[in-house]
Image (cartoon, helix red, strand yellow):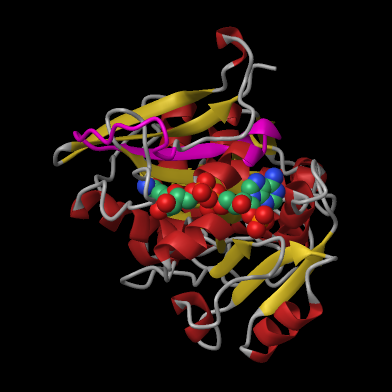
Amino acid sequence: MFEPAQFDSDADAMRYAIEIARRGIGRVEPNPAVGAVLIDEQRRLLAAGWHEQFGEAHAEVNAFRDFERRHPDEAARAELIRNATLLVTLEPCCHHGKTPPCSDAVIASGVRRVVVGLRDPSPHVDGGGLRQMEAAGLDVFAGVLEDDVRLLNAPFLMLLQNGRPWVHAKWAMTLDGRIATRTGSSKWISCEASRAIVHELRGRMDAIIVGSGTAKADDPLLTARPDGPRTATRVVVDARAELLLDSQLIRTARDTPVIVATLESAPAENINALSSAGVEVQRLPAGDTPKHVDLAELLRELGRRSMTNVLVEGGGGLLGSLFDRQLVDEAHVFIAPKFCGGRDAVSPVGGLGVETIPQQPELDPCVVTQVEQDVYLRGHVRRTL
Ligand SMILES: NC(=O)c1ccc[n+]([C@@H]2O[C@H](COP(=O)([O-])OP(=O)(O)OC[C@H]3O[C@@H](n4cnc5c(N)ncnc54)[C@H](OP(=O)(O)O)[C@@H]3O)[C@@H](O)[C@H]2O)c1
């Protein structure tokens, strides 16, 4: 990646810190992705670092290590740091977690000024890092590109503030908006390059979720191929725990975890058979209808397991219920230049839907990319209700 030698403004340097923070996505969760940049008085880049791996050094510490590498002479370093500014996307932590407090490291570094993107709302930080650095006599300023940092860390903030993971929805559809034909055939709608993007996405998720209809129709494996930085637990929403014992999911359950989310009233023999096959059966209360599990409760359960990002891969029944309950946060939609036709072909989002056009949720911001012949749209879901 291009590394700028000098920045025009604090915001410009913060933008670069956000960019490098992204390199940790998929590796640092449930921690936030954080980037840090050290600049001199002319805003020349002195060093940069990001949080690379959960449990390992935070961004600020990595930036100071980079500073030592780039400027091996101790006296020269001491001279440079006296007038330097540290820009960090998230408030430095002030508590002993898996690593010592970053606020101590920042103070000990001798840096004069600290610019923070977003104050960390975690209860054990919550302004404490800022106050500690101010008390030590540093010039501290918070709130530069705060909204951009919120976007960067939307999954972290969702888990922290709502106790559930960030929900990504993915589907591949034809030009006439269908994800499967009237007979349930869906392999393949999108091209190989689009499917490779989905595998990359799977590789940074904590869970991949499908409805029982998709598990039955497609017999999917739901693993990332090739492997990504994390291994997702595969989750099937299946009210009666009827997932077939000879399905690919069950046959691989001892290698890659599978959870069947089912109703408390699911038949005991189904539950026992799944448990014996190495599946974790998660019994949940009924939601909107007595026939279906409570999806909000399922997400809270995944949140209790510190899952930060989950990918729902359909089908239309499950995604419709999630959209109706406003539980989809980001969408990844692949549109292939093909026609399916048929009133009974499967639509990507079933459920009840909205009543009027102004109520439609939309992708904002929406990024559109061409992938060979397919169009890939992705963005956060902005709710209008
Ligand atoms: N092109 C693509 O990207 C893509 C992706 C996925 C699937 N597909 C295709 O889509 C088709 C399957 O779609 P589908 O709509 O029939 O099935 P689905 O959404 O996978 O599964 C429907 C089932 O999900 C559960 N469900 C629905 N609403 C729920 C709620 N509110 N709470 C809890 N559970 C709920 C119900 O099962 P229980 O009653 O058992 O709980 C329901 O029968 C297949 O043909 C597949 O090939 C295509």
173 with respect to 190 (left or right): right
147 or 184, nearer to the observer: 184
The kind of secondary structure the magenta stretch mainly shows is loop
Q: Residue furthest left?
A: 372
Query: Which quadrant of the figure has residue 359?
Result: top right
Q: In percent of the image, x 60 and y 65: which residue is there?
A: 235
In x, y percent, where is residue 272?
Answer: 74, 85
Above or below, 93 against 229 in this view is: above
284 with respect to 22 (left or right): right
Q: In percent of the image, x 20 and y 35: which residue is there?
A: 338
The question of residue 336 being in magenta is answered with: yes
77 or 103, nearer to the observer: 103
Magenta residues (range): 321-346
Q: Residue furthest bottom?
A: 276
139 or 193, nearer to the observer: 193
114 or 209, nearer to the observer: 209
The question of residue 178 being in magenta is answered with: no
Q: In percent of the image, x 50 and y 63: which residue is there?
A: 215
Query: Which quadrant of the figure has residue 170?
Result: top left
Q: State which quarter of the image contains the C terminus.
A: top right
Above or below, 29 against 99 in this view is: above
In x, y percent, where is residue 41?
Answer: 45, 34
